[in-house]
Image (cartoon, rainbow, N blue to C red):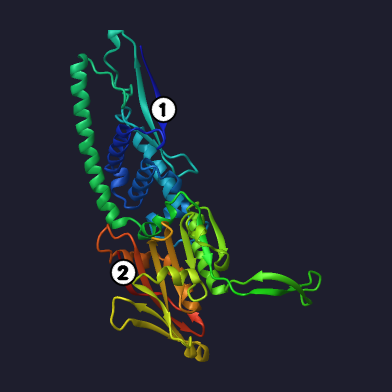
Amino acid sequence: MTVSSESAATSETLRDEEKFVILAQLERLLATPYFSHSRRFPAFLRYIVRATVDGQADLLKERTIGIEIFGKGADYDTAVDPIVRVTAGEVRKRIAQYYQEPGHEREVRLSLTPGSYVPQFHFPEVHSDPDPGDAALSPAEPVALHSVAVQGGEASGARWRWVLAVALALIVIAAAAGFLVWRTSHSSAFAEFWNPILSSPDPVLLCVADQTEYTAISLRDAADPSHQVTLNDNLTAVVIDDLNAIVKIAGVLQSAGKHYSLRGENATNLMDLRNGPSIVIGAYDNAWTLRMLKPLRFHFANNPEMTMFSIVDSAQHDNARWVLDRRQQVETNNYRDYAIVARFSDQITGEPMLIAAGIARGGTIAAGEFLTNSALLEQVRAQQPSTKAKNVEVVLSTQIINGEPGTPSIEAVYYW
C-alpha cells in the first residue's frame, strides 16, 4: 500500500534543496494565466515567497509590504488604503484556483493563511512498503519532492538524484536571474536605505537634541482648564520641529517591528552608541551630530559670531556651499534651510548610524520627510556608484515660507 501525507514547512525548517523546489514552483505559478497577465499579483507573491525563503518572514507586515511593493509612504494609513489586504486575498484565491486544476497533485503546494502574509509550503510525502504491486503510482498520488522512491538500484537512484539536482539548479538560476532583474527595477530604495538599521538584531537608540531643563511647569486645572498653576519640576524640552522627524522615524521602526529607545543628547554616552544602531536627530543642539559628522565629507560649520551657519563640502575648495544667515531667518522667517542625512557604519562605535539634522528647524523637518519619501530615496540610490559603496551622505534643502518648510530637494549625494 502507498500512504500519502502532506507536511508544512517554514523558513526555519527548509533545507537548501527544498528552497530550490519552492522557487521553481513559484516560477511555475507565475507563468500561469492566473498571474502572468497582472503586474501587482506576481510582485506580491514573489516578494513574500522570497522573503520567507530568505529567512525574513518577520518583515512581512502589511505596512512594510505596502512600502516595498506598492511604493507607499512609511506613514500611509493602512485602514484607509487596504491595497495589501485586497491583493493578498486575490493572490490567495488565484493560488487555490491553480491547485484545483488536475495535474498539480505532484507539486509542492504554496498556501497563504487568511490574516497572514507569510506563505506556507506543503511537501507531499510518500511511504511505500515492499509490495512490488504498488511500485506504480496512480496519477492522483503525490510524489515526495525530497524523498522520491526510484527503482533500479543505488546507481540509477544516484543518477536520477544528480539529474534532478542539475535540473533544479538550472531552474533556480533562471528564477534567481529573473528575480534579480525584477528587484533591480522594482525593489524599494526605501528598504535598501533602512536595511542597515532595521536588519541589526539590537534595539535602536534615538538620540535627540534636548534643551535646558525647566525648573517649573504650568499645569491646567482639570475642573477649570482656563486656570493654570505653576509647579516646580525638572523637565527636559524637545523642539517640536525635531519631534516631527522623531515621529516619522519612530513610525518606520514601529512598522518594521523594531525595538527602540529614546534618549536626550545630554543623557547619551559613547557606550550607549556602541550597544546597537543609533539614529541621531538635530545639529547645532546635538553635540553627537557635530562629533560624528566632523570627519565626513559633508558636515556643519559656523562663524565665530554664530550668525552664519553652513554645511561645508570638505572636497571642494570653496567649501561653504550651503549657508543660512541667522539674521535673515529671524527678521523675515523666509529663508532657505539645509540639512544633512547620513547613514554610515561609524568607525568609533562599530555600529550603523543614521543622522538627520537641519541647520535650522525647517531643515530637520525636511530630513525626516526625506527619510520616509520613497521617491527621494530612489533618486539617491540612482547615484550609487556600485553595490560596494555602503555608506551615504545626502545634503538637502527646503524653502521656508512664513516658518513652514516646503518639499525637500536633494543638493548633493556622496557614497563611499
Whole-percent x, y for residue 381 in the image: 31, 63
The mark that comes first in sequence, 1 or 2, is 1
Side of 226 where 172 appears, left or right:
left
Whole-percent x, y for residue 391 in the image: 34, 62
Image vertical order of residue 256 relative to residue 113, above or below: below
Q: Which mark is on residue 414?
A: 2
| Amino acid type indicated by mark 2 | Tyr
Q: Which mark is on residue 273?
A: none
| Amino acid type indicated by mark 1 | Ser
Image vertical order of residue 257 relative to residue 330, above or below: above
Q: Which mark is on residue 7?
A: 1
Characterize the local packing of mark 1: few (<14), some (14-19) or many (20 or more) Cα atoms within 10 angstroms.
Answer: few
Q: Residue at x 79, y 72 (%)?
A: 221
Whole-percent x, y for residue 211 in the image: 59, 74
> In this figure, what is the number of numbered marks?
2
Q: Residue at x 42, y 80 (%)?
A: 301
